[in-house]
Every structure is written in structure tokens, then in C-alpha cells.
Image (cartoon, coloured by chain):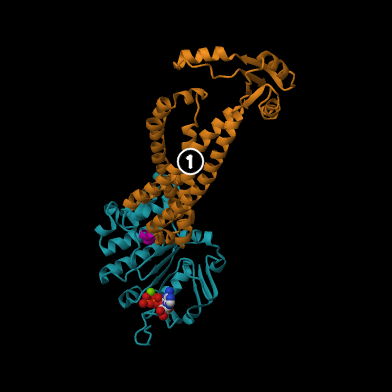
Chain colours: A cyan, B orange
Amino acid sequence: MIRLQNVSKSYAGRLALKDVNLHVALGEFAFLVGPSGAGKSTLMRLLYREEVPTSGNVFIGGVNLNKLSSPQIPLLRRRLGIIFQDYKLLTRQTAYDNVAYILRAHGIDEKEVRKRVNSALNVVNLEDKQDAFPDELSGGEQQRVGIARAIVNGPPVLLADEPTGNLDPATSLEIVQLLARISQRGTTVLISTHDHTIVNTMRRRVISMRAGEVATDIDSGFYEVQGQIQV
Amino acid sequence: MRHLRVFWRICVETMLGIKHSGWSNWLVVSILAIALTIFGSVLQLTMTLKDVVNYFGSQMVISAFLKDNFEPGKVAQEISQFVEVRLVEVIDKNKSWGEMQKTMKVASIPNPLPNTLHIRVAKPEQVEKLAPKLQLLSGVEAVRYPMMVARRLNEVRHFFEIAGVAVTAVLAFATLIVIGNTIHLVIQARHKEIEILSLMGVGHFYIKCPFVLQGAFYGAVSALFAAVVIIGVELYVIKPYVSNELVSFASMMPTGFGYNLVETFLVMLALGMAVGAGGGAWASGRYIKI
Ligand SMILES: Nc1ncnc2c1ncn2[C@@H]1O[C@H](COP(=O)(O)OP(=O)(O)OP(=O)(O)O)[C@@H](O)[C@H]1O
Ligand SMILES: [Mg+2]
């Protein structure tokens, strides 16, 4: 579902990603870990075509993102659910309207919108807060709105760049477990994080990056500690 | 149906954008309204002059004033020999003097009027051909025809037309920049929102369209204000003036004289919306990077 072939990305001559090769299969759930500056966010931005690689190819569902024209980028992003560390909610709109936005922008009729939004809010268990504005919600609740928005279109791929970066440990675990439940329905999920506890609790695939390179890639792995990998 | 719903959503986004623009709405609308008022007035004036010119230009009568020692009937006979002439009417100087004395209460002085012939031709363009020939006749003192007035007016109109185009071009450019900058500010204020929409996969057209519509909306509202000003001036300043001070002049005019205000408004509306939408399109194209 997600494939990177010899991908490098440099900013002003400095390499942020070096010859990265990676494959995440359909329905897989994987963590992307690594110290600050390792290139996790850069990799994520390549996946949702916020950036283009300096060299190499990025594929999502067989589509080479290098070949996308500018009007095709929204089409790609509609097939991705993107979740952000800072949630990126529309502050002037309620939880419900945030989730409904993309559907309405495509002229889906209000009855169908209600059905899909309620179903997405149900998945994140936030139906009772649907009329709240983002600033009336806790961080965890805001992130759950973000997740509901990401899944409302039923995308085959979910990308989450440090989705728990601003949350306390208990809430973080809750959010990641929620994403794991969503992945069980066949959605490919890639989460970048440097939260050891979560990675070690979940015991899923761990792709570990260091200085722009994939250092290790282990199924049911642990977070790498001090250069050692516990298996 | 789906497209209709999308269009409706875009309109809602536009209205929200306008609501969030606050005081700058008024700045843009007042500047654009002033520009459109000037444009509309010039348009109204040149079009009215054009009407008058056409009215005079379409007259098919030449007035020939005769020398006192010539017999009007004889000159009329002579003139009717020209092929262009359809009808010659003799206006006796004593008769017209009598009428003038009745209507205008002029002092009893010797009759200053000449005998006059009204010569009708078949086609308007024959007026200018025939008039110089008449002038050469020995019995004719002077020749007058409405086209002479029309020519003068046409020159005036031409000047206003050129000045109007120039002024409009400058004003349109200035307002384009004002609108562009206002919408630039709106885009800046909403750049986070725009980024979010873009990441959510909202289409570029859907994101940019509200800004273009916002500009067009400014154009429409400004045209409305400008039209109110122009109609007000027309009704409360020009109309009373024309009917009080220029009654004799106005009575010469055909009824329904004057350029249609509705048409002026439609032209202002079109221009305002075009300039507004243009400013919005320019700003959203230049400043929304997605
Ligand atoms: N827009 C940019 N311009 C210049 N350099 C950049 C840009 N984005 C990232 N970099 C550089 O690329 C490298 C990788 O950054 P990236 O944000 O991908 O790291 P990260 O793994 O996400 O780190 P963190 O855990 O702190 O979020 C860093 O050295 C960073 O300075
Ligand atoms: Mg990062």
C-alpha cells in the first residue's frame, strides 16, 4: 500500500532522508520511531505529497506520487486519512462540522453526511461532544475529532505524525488503541512516535529511523533503547 | 443536484469570509463605490450626449434664412429643383413674428426675423450634402441644420468618452489593487484554515472560489451604492434643473430623452463584479499556495 524506493530528500543540501526503502502492506499497522530530526515527519510529508523527494519514488496504492499533477493532489489526500500532532481542527466549527466538512465540500447530501459523520464520531466515541467547538474539548477529545475526520471518507490509509505528542500517557495509549482498532477493519496505519511506552505496549511492527535512514524494521518490535534492540 | 450543493457550500464559505472581514469590507466597498459612481456618471453623460447627437443627426430638415429682398416663393421654387428635396415649407416672417410676440411677450420692435424655408430631405445623410449647395444660392442668407449642433456635441461627447475610459481604467486598476490586498489580508488571516482544508483533500477550486466570489460581492454591493448616488443626483438635481431652468431647451428634446438608468446600472454591476472577481482571483492565485 505504501512503498518508498530509494527515496532521498535534502533541504538546502542537507539530507533529511537517505536512500530509504520501505514497504507497508495493505491493512498493516506500523510505528515509525526515531530520535528528533531522524526524518519521520519528512517521510510522512512525502506520503501526503506535502513534499516531493529529491530522488527516488513514493507509491501509495500503486500510484507514483512524483507523477501527480497539482489538481490530483486533493484526490490523493482524500484517499488518505491524515492525523496531526496539533490536530489541525477548524477552530470556528463544531466537532460535527469539522468531521462533516470534506463531505459537504463534495456536495454529499445532508442525510448521508449525518449518517457518515455519526458513524465516524461513534468509532471515536465522541457522539455526545459533537456540538462542542475545539477549544471546548480536551486534547484527547480534539485528537479523536481529528481521527473521526480522517476516517469519515473511509480511506484505505491512515497517516499519523506524532498523534499523541501533545497528550498524557493514558490518553496517548487510548488514541493508539483506537487507531489499532480502526486498522483491524483493513486500513493501513502508519504512526510516527517517540513514545516508548506505547510502542512497547502494542508490540507491532516498528520501523526505526536514525539520521534519515531506516536503521531497523522489526515485526512485533520494541522501541530501540540506547542502540540496543530488545526482542 | 450535487453541483448545486457544492455551489451552495461555496456561497456559505463566501458569506463566512465576508463576515470575518469586518471593517475592511466597508473600506473596499466605499472605494469601489466611488470609482463606480464616477464611471457611471461619465457613462450616463456620454450616452445621453450620444442620444442627443443621434436625435439631431436624424433630423432631415434644413433651415434656410432668406435675404429680405428676395421673394420666398421664388427661392422655394428654385430649391425644390434639387433631387434630394422632398418638401419645401415657407415660413413667413410676419407670421412667425406674430406668434413669437404672442407666446413670449416681446417688445414691439420692427420684425427682426428673416423669411425662412424649411427644406425636408428624404435621408438624414443628404442634409450635409445639400446644405452647402443651398448656401450658394443668391437668395439665401444663411443655412442652419441640426447636424451642426450634433457635430459640436459629438466632439464634447468624444472628449468625455476618452476621459471616461482613461479615468475608468485608472480607477479599475486602483480598485483591483485595493480588493486584491484586502483579500490577501483575508487569506493571511485564514491561512491555517486553508492549509487544513488542503491537507484534508479539499479541491483547489473549492478553496479559492469563495475569495473570487467575495470580490464579486464587493463589486455588486458597490454598484448598488453607486447606482443609488447616480439615481439620486438624476432625480433630485438634474431633473428639477432641466425642467425649471432649461425648459425651452428641454422642450426641444424628444420624450424619453436620456440614457436608461437601468442599463447604466447593469454596466456598473458588470464592471464592478468583474473588477472584484478579478481582484479576488488575482489574490487567491498569488497568495494561496497549495
Ligand atoms: N522545511 C524544512 N526545511 C529545512 N530543513 C528541514 C525542513 N523540514 C525538516 N528539515 C530537516 O530535516 C531533518 C528531519 O526533520 P524531521 O522533521 O523529519 O524530523 P523528525 O524525525 O520528524 O523529528 P521530530 O521527532 O523532532 O519531529 C531535520 O534535520 C530537519 O532540520
Ligand atoms: Mg516530526
User: Relative to residue B129, is residue A164 depicted above or below?
Assistant: below
Kind of element beneath mark 1: helix
x and y percentages locating residue B72 in the rendered image? 66, 15
User: What segment is highlighted magenta in the picture?
Assistant: B188-193
Chain letter behind tag 1: B
Q: Is residue B188 above or below residue B258?
A: below
Check disc 1 and give the amino acid type. Answer: Val
- Given residues A222 and B9, the one toward you in this image is B9
Is residue A29 inside the magenta stretch?
A: no
Q: Is residue B22 visible?
A: no
- Residue B195: % across, % down: 41, 62
Quarter of the rendered structure image containing ligand 1: bottom left
Name the residue nearer the viewer: A2 or B266.
B266
Dot 1 beta carbon under 8 Å from ligand 1: no
Q: Is residue B122 above or below residue B176?
A: above
Q: Which residue is mark 1?
A: B42
Q: Position of residue A73 (x, y in %)?
A: 50, 61
Image mark count: 1
